[in-house]
Image (cartoon, coloured by chain):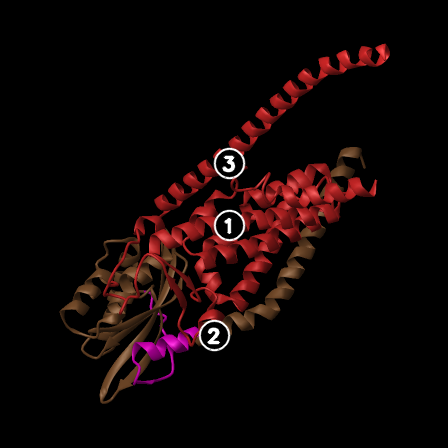
């Protein structure tokens, strides 16, 4: 019984990360995934704030699930989500103003994010607080990883480097006031106007069209991996069935032999 | 009271209590965050003022309340050596969001540096990276004029918004003199 419960908790947590990843599998939350994935820092910030809102709203909706009447389910969920988004927005503006200005309107738009509302509606309202908490964490981590993968590809291909410290200024402060840059496809630029000595970056990837392309290719790769796994499972099942068929007559033949002895 | 009325009352009460608790929580957090947000904004404004005319003496801010200057919020009189100048705080909106920035105007009505305070445009970073940053970089000469034309040409929604602000700032300064 305990084992079953433990595996159910584990399933709530893990499914959101890979099996039911909100972005790569369910294709939810596409708008912020395309808009804030210009830099890995912004994507990480968005992922953390998104996880915070998702976990808090999931937990509260789950805790109030017996009080909330069926007729007012959606309005109650929206009020709860809107409250947490407002709180997160105010705290971010006070504590991390650069992250707040980078995310801009997409932070407020979390109120109508289909993952947050979807998890409340599909999971939290029907399950216990602990499971809902794990579901929120799992989906949050899954979404954060997904947008960070897109951001990594876009930032490297689009700007030719990875920058830390533009959104999280404490990194720049630790680096003597200058953002920390890892140059990959481009060289250091002597001024904001003069270009670097060598540059293989493609600014197309920093545009929304580039985001669509990266998302499409990532989805195709994931689909190929999943299909490959499914095909392998099918082949394995067939082989197993064949082996069972082969071994069945041998057993039938061996039984009379024993009798003969 | 019939069944339907009882049910409606129950739903209304629950919604009202969730809304009430939500409002109280938001207000409580706002009490703590509002001063910090205001302090952040002032800090940012102070940094931007020093960037616009680095060696100047900046006076006290004066509010602008004239109806003709809808984009102008306030200005700071500035003393650069023997010359007068002004820094205007402007804000405006377009279809993509809101922009508020500081614009430096010299006594001969030529433009000094600009600094973005807030930019909630969906493609907000483009305005700073592609237009304001190159303009800030050039001190004078032809390149600066070209960069200035890019910022204030009105070719993009952001540039159109800034063009309006710059025109109002210069007009206000001219009228005041």
Residue at the limit of the structure toward the bottom, as seen here:
B82
Quadrant assignment, res B1: top right
Q: Compare marks 3 and 2 and give the one earlier in the sequence.
A: 2
Taking the image as drawn, is residue A13 in sight?
yes
Secondary structure under tag 2 reads helix
Q: CA distance from mark 3 to mark 2?
A: 40 Å
Neighbor class of circle 3 (other Cα within 10 Å; few <14, some 14-19, many 20+) is few
**How far across and down, in percent of the image, does residue A62 sit?**
72, 46
Neighbor class of circle 1 (other Cα within 10 Å; few <14, some 14-19, many 20+) is few
Q: Point out which mark residue A109 bears.
A: 1
**Rendered residue at 21%/65% (across/down):** B148
Q: Is residue A224 left or right of residue B167?
A: right
Q: Which residue is mark 3?
A: A225
Q: Compare marks 3 and 1 and give the one earlier in the sequence.
A: 1
**How far across and down, in percent of the image, does residue B172 sit?**
26, 71
Q: Which chain is depicted brown?
A: B
Q: Which chain is indicated by disc 2?
A: A
Q: Which chain is depicted red?
A: A
Q: Compare marks 2 and 1 and give the one earlier in the sequence.
A: 1
Q: Nearer the viewer, residue B168 or A197?
A: A197
Q: Which residue is mark 2?
A: A174
Taking the image as drawn, is residue A80 in sight?
no
Numbered range of the magenta stretch:
B44-67
- Is B16 rendered above or below residue A126? below
Q: CA distance from mark 3 to mark 1?
A: 32 Å
């Amino acid at each position: 019984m305990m084992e079953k419960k433990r595996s159910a908790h584990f399933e709530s947590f893990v499914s959101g990360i890979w099996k039911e990843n909100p972005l790569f599998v369910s294709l939810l939350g596409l708008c912020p995934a395309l808009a804030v994935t210009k830099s890995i820092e912004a994507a990480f910030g968005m992922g953390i704030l998104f996880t915070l809102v998702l976990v808090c709203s999931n937990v509260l909706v789950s805790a109030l699930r017996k009080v909330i009447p069926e007729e007012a389910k959606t309005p109650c969920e929206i009020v709860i989500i809107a409250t947490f988004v407002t709180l997160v927005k105010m705290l971010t503006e006070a504590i991390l103003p650069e992250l707040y200005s980078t995310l801009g309107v997409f932070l407020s738009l979390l109120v109508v994010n289909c993952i947050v509302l979807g998890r409340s509606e599909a999971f939290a309202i029907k399950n216990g607080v602990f499971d809902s908490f794990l579901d929120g964490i799992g989906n949050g981590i899954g979404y954060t990883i997904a947008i960070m993968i897109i951001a990594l590809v876009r930032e490297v291909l689009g700007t030719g480097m990875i920058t830390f410290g533009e959104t999280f200024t404490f990194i720049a402060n630790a680096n003597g006031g200058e953002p920390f840059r890892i140059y990959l496809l481009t060289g250091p630029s002597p001024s904001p106007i003069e270009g670097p000595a060598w540059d293989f970056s493609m600014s197309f990837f920093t545009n929304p069209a580039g985001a669509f392309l990266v998302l499409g290719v990532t989805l195709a790769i994931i689909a190929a991996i999943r299909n490959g796994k499914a095909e392998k499972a099918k082949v394995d099942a067939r082989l197993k069935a064949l082996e069972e068929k082969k071994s069945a007559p041998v057993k039938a033949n061996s039984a009379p032999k024993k009798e003969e002895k | 009271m019939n069944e339907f009325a009882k049910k409606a009352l129950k739903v209304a009460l629950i919604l009202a209590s969730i809304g009430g608790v939500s409002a109280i929580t938001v207000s409580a957090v706002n009490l703590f965050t509002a001063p910090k947000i205001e302090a952040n904004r002032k800090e940012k404004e102070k940094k931007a003022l020093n960037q616009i005319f680095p060696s100047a003496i900046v006076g006290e801010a004066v509010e602008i309340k004239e109806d003709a200057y809808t984009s102008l919020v306030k200005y700071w009189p500035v003393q650069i050596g023997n010359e007068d100048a002004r820094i205007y705080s402007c804000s405006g909106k377009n279809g993509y969001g809101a922009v508020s920035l500081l614009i430096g105007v010299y006594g001969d009505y030529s433009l000094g540096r600009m600094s973005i305070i807030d930019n909630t445009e969906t493609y907000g970073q483009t305005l700073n990276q592609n237009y304001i940053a190159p303009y800030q970089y050039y001190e004078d000469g032809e390149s600066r004029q070209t960069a200035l034309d890019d910022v204030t040409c009105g070719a993009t929604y952001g540039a159109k918004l800034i063009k309006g602000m710059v025109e109002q700032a210069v007009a206000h300064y001219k009228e005041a003199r």
